[in-house]
Amino acid sequence: MRSSLGLTERHLFSVSDTIRKKQRSLQMATVRSKGNKATELKLASILRSAGIKGWRRHQPLPGRPDFIFREARLAIFVDGCFWHGCRWHCRMPKTRLGFWYPKIARNRKRDRSVGIMLRRRGWRVIRLWEHSLSNPLRTVSLLQTALDSSLRNG
Ligand SMILES: [Zn+2]
């Protein structure tokens, strides 16, 4: 059956399908960027409850580290399992693979080059996976060790 515009029903269906897919990936992007914020807040609360002080967020350094300890020259990134392609938890969306896959590959590439830039400026870089925050004790001990050794080595 043809509509008055001469489009077949199937054609109309595929257009609305495409729009729906676009909306869905937009929604997904929103959900995931909120997820990233939540992950940062989670680390902030882990640090607070462990009584670890002296950190700042979002300082103007290469890659905008999520947290820095200026005195210890330690930069911390919390990597969302999806956005940074965690091997355990990154499930590729079924639609628009051609968009998501290169995007995540670019993120990973940028993570590496940001790390190189920061190290050149004398920063140590720690990247924590979002999933690792589910073990606060381990996270704290990892950071505490890094902080102690940074401050010791001056
Ligand atoms: Zn993960």
Image: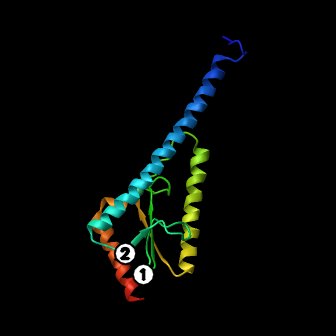
Q: Residue at x 56, y 59 (%)?
A: 107
Q: Identify residue for label 2.
A: 54
Q: Are marks 1 and 2 in contact (CB under 8 Å)?
A: yes
* Crowding near the residue tagged with mark 1, few <14, some 14–19, many ≥20 C-alpha atoms within 10 Å: few
* Crowding near the residue tagged with mark 2, few <14, some 14–19, many ≥20 C-alpha atoms within 10 Å: few
Judge by depth and name the residue closer to the eye, 95 or 120.
120
The answer to whether 14 is drawn above or below residue 83 in the figure is above
**Which of the 4 quarters of the picture holds residue 50?**
bottom left
Q: Identify residue for label 1.
A: 71
State the SS at label 1: loop
> Is residue 127 found left or right of 107 in the rendered image?
left
Q: Is residue 94 visible?
A: no
Mark 1 or mark 2: name the one nearer the start of the chain: 2
Query: In the rendering, at what x and y percent does residue 49 appear?
Result: 26, 66
Looking at the picture, which amino acid does disc 1 mark? Answer: Glu
Q: CA distance from mark 1 to mark 2?
A: 8 Å
Looking at the picture, which amino acid does disc 2 mark? Answer: Gly
